[in-house]
Amino acid sequence: MSGHNKWSQIKHKKAITDGKRSKIFGKLSKLIALEAKKAQGNLASPCLRAVIERAKKESMPADNIDRAVKKGAGGDAGNMESVLFEAYGPSGCAILIEGLTDNKNRTVQEIKHILSKRGLSLAGQGAASWAFVKTHEGWEPQTMCPIAESDTEALEDLLEALDEHDDVQDVFTNAE
């Protein structure tokens, strides 16, 4: 009976946790490279310092952080740009999707595809952001939107699918 010994169980659990950490490290690496490019490699820059501290909280290895800073400072980060998408989710709750991408057209199409699979679409600029206030932490909802119990699973599925996308950094919603 293969796959039933203790090592196989540990190996499968480790693969799952390593996959999750890899996803987080990838997103943080993009963010560090972008901030390093803006700060021209100056580690004293407050924005770069904040992103590095966030990476350290996630237990990102120091060599990965250094590699991302060198990539951004050396100009190898390409033309990374931050994007903000707005949409309305189940029960009419507002959704803001922050991302970093090197190809805006590709990312727009992939986000549209994720939304359209769930019967949703992107909203125009400013259509959902009015419900949020920009803070140093991200976007804070000004008004909360009650969501039906039947739509809770649909919203969780959508948020999970968006979080799985490589270019998406954060997703904010005003659902209760």
Image (tube, rainbow, N blue to C red):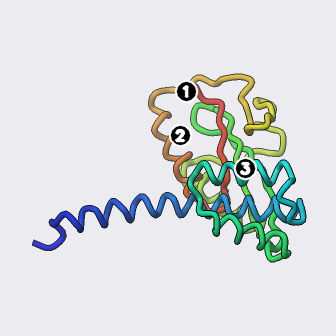
Could you classify mark 1 by the number of other residues whose Cα lies within 10 Å: few (under 14), some (14-19), or many (20 or more)? Answer: some
- Identify the image quadrant of the N terminus: bottom left
Amino acid type at image mark 3: Glu
Q: What residue type is labelled 2?
A: Leu
User: Would residue 18 be found to the left or right of residue 142 on screen?
Assistant: left
The disc, 3 or 2, on the residue closer to the chain's N-terminal end is 3
Residue pictured at 70% horizontal, 71% vertical:
67
Query: Nearer the N terminus, badge 2 or badge 1?
Result: 1
Residue tagged 1: 147
Q: Name the residue under label 3.
A: 98
In front: label 3 or label 2: 3
Disc 3 and disc 2: Cα gap in Å?
Answer: 17 Å
Residue 155's disc is 2
Q: Please tell me in which quadrant of the rendered image residue 66 appears.
A: bottom right
| First of labels 1, 3 by sequence position | 3
Residue type, label 1: Ile
Alpha carbons under labels 1 and 3: distance apart: 22 Å
Residue 12, position in %: x, y?
31, 64
Quadrant for residue 165, please give it.
bottom right
Viewed as shown, does residue 144 lie left or right of 86?
Answer: left
Residue pictured at 38% horizontal, 65% vertical: 15
- Residue 144, compared with residue 7, is above or below; it is above
State the SS at label 2.
helix
Q: Which quadrant of the rendered structure holds the C terminus?
A: top right
